[in-house]
Image (tube, rainbow, N blue to C red):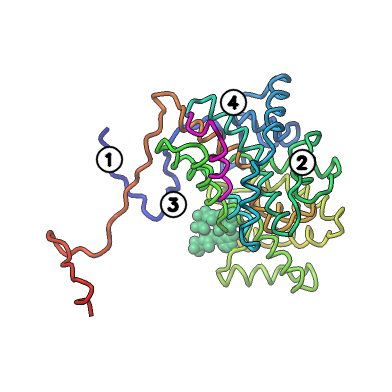
Amino acid sequence: MAVETVRVKNTGLRGVTVADTKISYIDGENGVLIYRGYRIEELAERSTFMETAFLLLNGHLPKKSELEGFEAQVVQARELPGFILESMEKFPKGTDPMDVLQASIPMLAMADPEVNDDSREANVRKAVRLIARTPAAVAAWHRIRNGRKPLAPDNALSHAANFLWQLSGEKPGAEIARDLDLCLVLHADHTFNASTFACREVVSTNAHIYAGVTAGVGALSGSLHGGANERVMKMLLEVESELPSVDDVGPWVMKRIESGRKIMGMGHAVYKTFDPRAKILKEMSRRLTAKAGHPKWYEYLARIEEEGIKGFAARGKPEINTNVDFYSGAVYSAMGIPIDIMTPVFAISRISGWCAHIIEEKFAEAQDKPALYRPEAEYVGNYCGEVGCTYQPVPDRG
Ligand SMILES: CC(C)(COP(=O)(O)OP(=O)(O)OC[C@H]1O[C@@H](n2cnc3c(N)ncnc32)[C@H](O)[C@@H]1OP(=O)(O)O)[C@@H](O)C(=O)NCCC(=O)NCCS
């Protein structure tokens, strides 16, 4: 296939369409997010994470029997292979949970007898195991690093409730479990974001699903992507300790914008208006922070949002608004989730979208089949003419 060279250097591929997808859609101008045809607001209100994960993987909402079967498969796959827990015991206790999660995915591959079966059916089964076991890996590491024993899953608990149980050793109330489940629905997919593209790029080489997901976890850990929720929470705690009153937020925001420092949780590569997920999380954070005895967190955040939007608009950037990470940190903190577990929580949701995209990448119809990703770079390094630079042996190099 002859391909015309298109130069999109240093744009992060913004505005470049590289594949077809049936999984999700964003209308960034109007603040719309759709999974498989369903608006995120509708799923947030009426669906569950298990149902949403099924929808993303299979393309349709499950019938009752399909949902029950899917949930049972996930519950059955929750237990982590023993050698993974034994390996974690040997990891340095200060290791970042995202690094441990990233290291755990290839170990899940080692434990999977179907790892090299690349049929669609086997990939769906592997996706189920990944969805079931990533929360277990995050929870196990949190306990091990704190000198505690990992807990066995409680199969009577929902996906979200079981994660909180395995993390903290306490059975969560129904409201918290439902709220976390809703957070998982909101984070499950987001078209060709950096981590999803990383997953798809890796499996475009025919690498297996675990190799793709490992890349996705690495991409998500960055502060410009999933790592932003942790940074918003740290920013909020700093603001709370430094500013005596919510009324001091305006000057703080202005100073931050003028100094060129980013306000974490604001701005988005695709949304040029509000992020529909942030709207839902805003209301949840108001309710949960009040319940947890930290109503000021919400007040500070809401004021940063208000002053930020005003400040950016006054500087000709009216498109900068709050994104999904802005309120989620306060939501997770109010649930008792430690700051460095927030990005892993993002991952245990996004794993469903990553797997759906990996399966789509591998099994697209022939006419839509994406090619092995292989962009080009412009060489701007040394060039010593047609003969190349003269090699000097080490002792002659001065
Ligand atoms: C998400 C993000 C990377 C999107 O990037 P983008 O659309 O490529 O936009 P850019 O980073 O190029 O920013 C465009 C301009 O707006 C400014 N800007 C964007 N987001 C900003 C923020 N949160 N705070 C301050 N300035 C911001 C940039 O500094 C840049 O200014 P300039 O044109 O004067 O150099 C960016 O908004 C950001 O870094 N946000 C903070 C991190 C975050 O919340 N990430 C989670 C994303 S879901």
Q: Indicate the amino acid at tag 3.
A: Gly
Write down the residue under mark 4.
58
Q: Could you give the CA–CA distance between mark 3 and mark 2, rounded to whole angstroms? A: 38 Å
Apparent side of residue 340 relative to residue 363 in the rendered image (left or right): right
Q: What is the secondary structure assignment of the residue under circle 2?
A: helix
Of pointers 1 and 3, the one earlier in the residue sequence: 1
Please state which of the two labelled residues, at mark 4 or mark 1, is closer to the viewer. Answer: 4
Residue 114 on the magenta span: yes
Of pointers 4 and 2, the one earlier in the residue sequence: 4
Q: Could you give the CA–CA distance between mark 1 and mark 3, rounded to whole angstroms? A: 19 Å
Write down the residue under mark 1.
4
Q: Could you give the CA–CA distance between mark 4 and mark 1, rounded to whole angstroms? A: 35 Å
Is residue 317 among what the camera can see? no
Q: Quadrant of the N terminus?
A: top left
Q: Is mark 3 within 8 Å of ligand 1?
A: yes
Please state which of the two labelled residues, at mark 1 or mark 2, is closer to the viewer. Answer: 2
Apparent side of residue 137 relative to residue 248 in the rendered image (left or right): left
Residue 387 on the magenta span: no
Choose between 103 and 178: the one closer to the eye: 103
Q: Could you give the CA–CA distance between mark 4 and mark 2, rounded to whole angstroms? A: 24 Å
Q: Where on the picture, by quarter, is residue 183?
A: top right
Q: Could you give the CA–CA distance between mark 4 and mark 3, rounded to whole angstroms? A: 30 Å
Provide the residue span drawn in magenta. Answer: 103-117
Q: Where on the picture, by quarter, is residue 227?
A: bottom right
Which percent across, then down, holds residue 344? Answer: 65, 50
